[in-house]
Amino acid sequence: MKSHPLFTFLYPFMVFLSVLSSSNAGDSLSSGQSISDGETLVSSGQSFELGFFSPGNSRNRFLGIWYKITPETVVWVANRNNPLADSNGTLTISNDEALVLLNQSKSVIWSSNSSGTLRNPVAQLLDSGNLVLRENSSLSSDEYSWQSFDYPSDTLLAGMNMGWNLATGLERYLSSWKSADDPSPGDYMFRLNRQGLPQWEMLLTDSVIKYRTGPWNGVQFSGASVEPSPVSKPTLIYNASEIYFTYEPPSKGVITRVTLNQSGLLQRLVYMNRSATWDIMYSTPNDLCDNYAKCGSNGFCRINKAPICNCLQGYTPKSLEEWDVLNWSSGWLLETFRVKLPDLIDFWLDKNMSLDECKAECLRNCSCVAYANSDVRGGGIGCLMWFGDLIDIREFHGVDYDQNIFIRLPASELDAIQGPNKKKRLIIIGIPPILGLFILAVAIWIICRRRRLKGRGWRSGKDNFDLPLYDFATIAAATDNFSSRNMIGQGGFGPSTRGKEIIEIMITQGNLSVDQEVAVKRLSKNSGQGLEEFMNEVILIAKLQHRNLVGLVGCCTEREERILIYEYMPNGSLDHFIFDQDKSFSLTWKIRFDIVMGIARGLLYLHQDSKLQIIHRDLKASNILLDANLNPKISDFGLARIFTGDEKEAKTSRVVGTCGYMSPEYLFNGNFSVKSDIFGFGVLLLEIISSKMNRGFCHPNHHHNLLGHAWLLWTQGRAFEILDESLYDSAIKSQVERCIHVGLLCVQKFPADRPAMSTVASMLGSEGTVLPQPKQPGFFTETSLENYNSTSNGEDYHTNSAVSITMPAGR
Ligand SMILES: *[C@@H]1O[C@H](CO)[C@@H](O)[C@H](O)[C@H]1NC(C)=O
Ligand SMILES: *[C@@H]1O[C@H](CO)[C@@H](O)[C@H](O)[C@H]1NC(C)=O
Ligand SMILES: *[C@@H]1O[C@H](CO)[C@@H](O)[C@H](O)[C@H]1NC(C)=O
Ligand SMILES: *[C@@H]1O[C@H](CO)[C@@H](O)[C@H](O)[C@H]1NC(C)=O
Ligand SMILES: *[C@@H]1O[C@H](CO)[C@@H](O)[C@H](O)[C@H]1NC(C)=O
Ligand SMILES: *[C@@H]1O[C@H](CO)[C@@H](O)[C@H](O)[C@H]1NC(C)=O
Ligand SMILES: *[C@@H]1O[C@H](CO)[C@@H](O)[C@H](O)[C@H]1NC(C)=O
Ligand SMILES: *[C@@H]1O[C@H](CO)[C@@H](O)[C@H](O)[C@H]1NC(C)=O
Ligand SMILES: *[C@@H]1O[C@H](CO)[C@@H](O)[C@H](O)[C@H]1NC(C)=O
Ligand SMILES: *[C@@H]1O[C@H](CO)[C@@H](O)[C@H](O)[C@H]1NC(C)=O
């Protein structure tokens, strides 16, 4: 036997097990054999173990399967509803070829559901965690007469098919444990609803919907932001015989599962070997808008707005008198973008219709209130129509498509929106009930109709979106006429340069009809930025919707003003924390790691997941803002550059950025690509770990910057020493080392050596992956860096302060 390090670790266990389970040391049980309490089956790859256990403080015994790791984590329970009171249970294969669990008096406590046609049955625990019953002669085949994967408990493992086998009627769903001591089915279920288009629903006590993912639209569930994640690739199989969801096993060494916890949270967890803990990668429901029908009927939930419940298109209330003067007689269709489709309660589906046919059909039928494509692939196909109230709509931005829905409005609304308001008086008498419902539905939007909706400047190509426009007077009033008392920063381009001057002012409880604190960014009139450029920037930012990007609340273009209104980040920017000795220790290692992961997710979205590929170009600690919960949000897209289609790299003669964060190829040659952002991210990562600035870093023994310092320590095997001393207590050594490693990979001199953001995110997120050795970082040998540092004098460095934002030409 090869002397593998793992072997020395496992050896004592193997002895221990073989003593206990003299008859069944292996992974299978054949007819006539049995296992009793204390004996176990272990899968061939040592991943899972089957045996008897007592959960939590309970004394009851259950037959279950658990991960063979510390802590033992149970993933499946056989006799959930029927515990054994003592340790005298046995598992065996009965005469009628089923797996049975017997108590001391040989009564059947639990039994598998088998057909009884096996001649030589064998039960085997597979390395996937699946307990299967099959013919001995066909040990290598996938034909099982029974498998535990068909009867999941609260845990979804790679390879499980969650959903329906339409041929046999078998449904596989998750149900939470009742408590940590009791694995019997608890309050929550997570099951696939196959009405119309398949969608997942989380149900409370079997009937009340708590959360749903939204219907499958050909690419993903239309409102589930959680998958795909770096550790799982989901698939939906959807044909006449089966509808199920499954995900591929993660890369080797990564241990991950999805569990429905007892408080009704569906969580993906990743096992951290060194600390022997499970880290939560995400939890669903994830925000308030995920709660089912949070905004009631016909409400539209937007997490970045305050209040979060809006009527569709962000309309603000219209006067009540106008209710009854509306012309309801014909429909107008309002297109609303980026949504999780409403729940399929009263609907109609044709998968073969085009959008135009769908529209015609909807307009023909007076109870149709909305329609959408049922499949967004290939430009969209299929027709989904809704009747009655629209329930549980939220703003949602898909991975690389937008799901749009067309909502019917009365004709008079078209006038109000499109042109001078020719009021039409029509008194509606004797409304039929169904029409009444419809009117009520639409009326709710109408009440909330935005007062003004102007702006052809708001369209770019076919990408349409909405963003509230505010009066200058409203903003001036809310900011106390841009009073310096409210000033929270003077951003980006100082008055000394010819560039745009930005004044950031904080408003508390402004008159903006929202109870939300916002930050107002007013660009000076001589900024040199035309309306079009400004609009481009606004369009760019408004299109970006991500938890880790600062959200745009509105804007104002009146009187040649250029004002952007952002959500206000009460904790300011990251640099104020990490580079400040007094505040630095308040960011513990865990918080810092979460910040790093947040920035990575935000950047991943910019680079890959949003519809446009965006290079930020000015990633730095002062552009990372922290919300009230210290969640990081990337801000300041003033320098961002959108890359079209297959463009991979661009060159600029105007090098604009911040010294210390710019990559060598960008600083010296003006070449930039996503890899320049990776460089900036690497610098930021090392700064977060060390609480020291790259620029202005100073060490008694050498003249290198922070990157050089980290590299020198790395080559001496002492990389851990760059960690800020105040974090020694809270730090998890393996995580810190991984972060330093990833940081050094990101700041490598040659762009091609640096990993892509998706790789960075998965390297940070899982301990399983083996990381390549970093090469020398950029600027390690260039002495010219010193010159750049001194000439720029610690100020932002730019050769030309003009802002370049380029929109892809309308296609
Ligand atoms: C399968 O059958 C063969 C021969 O009948 C036997 O030697 C072997 O032990 C059986 N395997 C299991 C797992 O029972
Ligand atoms: C049954 O289990 C209990 C402990 O749970 C043990 O004390 C008792 O001796 C067992 N009975 C037999 C017959 O093994
Ligand atoms: C075994 O189970 C049967 C049926 O549940 C029950 O009546 C019997 O008392 C149990 N025997 C023991 C020893 O627990
Ligand atoms: C076995 O399957 C049948 C239908 O195939 C189902 O009605 C029955 O409840 C199942 N029994 C168990 C114990 O799963
Ligand atoms: C449905 O899909 C499954 C998995 O791809 C496949 O095995 C099965 O044959 C399909 N059934 C039909 C009717 O297409
Ligand atoms: C479910 O998960 C959440 C988030 O990790 C945790 O706060 C909560 O305590 C968990 N609930 C139970 C019952 O374990
Ligand atoms: C209501 O709208 C329809 C279609 O736009 C129009 O034909 C009709 O004249 C309008 N009714 C009134 C009273 O304005
Ligand atoms: C779908 O529509 C196309 C043309 O519109 C037609 O040729 C095809 O037969 C239709 N398929 C079904 C299943 O109705
Ligand atoms: C509207 O469509 C629904 C579903 O197809 C149908 O039941 C209803 O009769 C239609 N109503 C009219 C007026 O066409
Ligand atoms: C983590 O532990 C599991 C189980 O012991 C092992 O299979 C895996 O290879 C380990 N991964 C790393 C990176 O050590």
Image (spheres, rainbow, N blue to C red):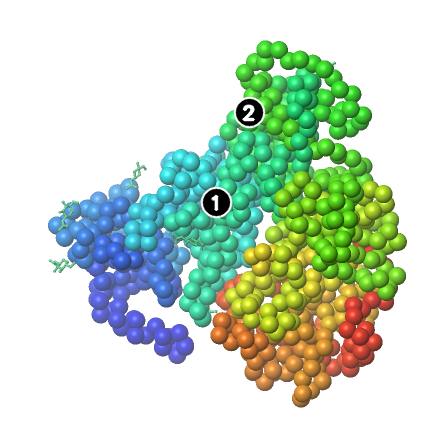
Three-letter amino acid code of the residue under disc 1: Phe
Q: Quick one: quadrant of the N terminus?
A: bottom left
Name the residue rendered at 62%, 37% in the picture.
310
Q: Secondary structure at mark 1?
A: strand
Q: Nearer the viewer, residue 263 or 136?
A: 263
Q: Position of residue 629 (x, y in %)?
A: 56, 57
Count of all numbered marks drawn on residues in the image: 2
Q: Position of residue 134 (x, y in %)?
A: 31, 50
Name the residue rendered at 38%, 59% in the picture.
127
Q: Position of residue 348 (x, y in %)?
A: 55, 26
Three-letter amino acid code of the residue under disc 2: Gly
- The residue that label 1 is drawn on is 245
Circle 1 packing at 10 Å, graded few (<14), some (14-19), many (20+), is many
Q: Nearer the viewer, residue 98 or 342?
A: 342
Q: Quick one: quadrant of the C terminus?
A: top right
- The residue that label 2 is drawn on is 388
182 horizontally vs 683: left or right: left
Residue that sits furthest to the top in the current view = 430
162 horizontally vs 433: left or right: left
Q: Secondary structure at mark 2?
A: loop
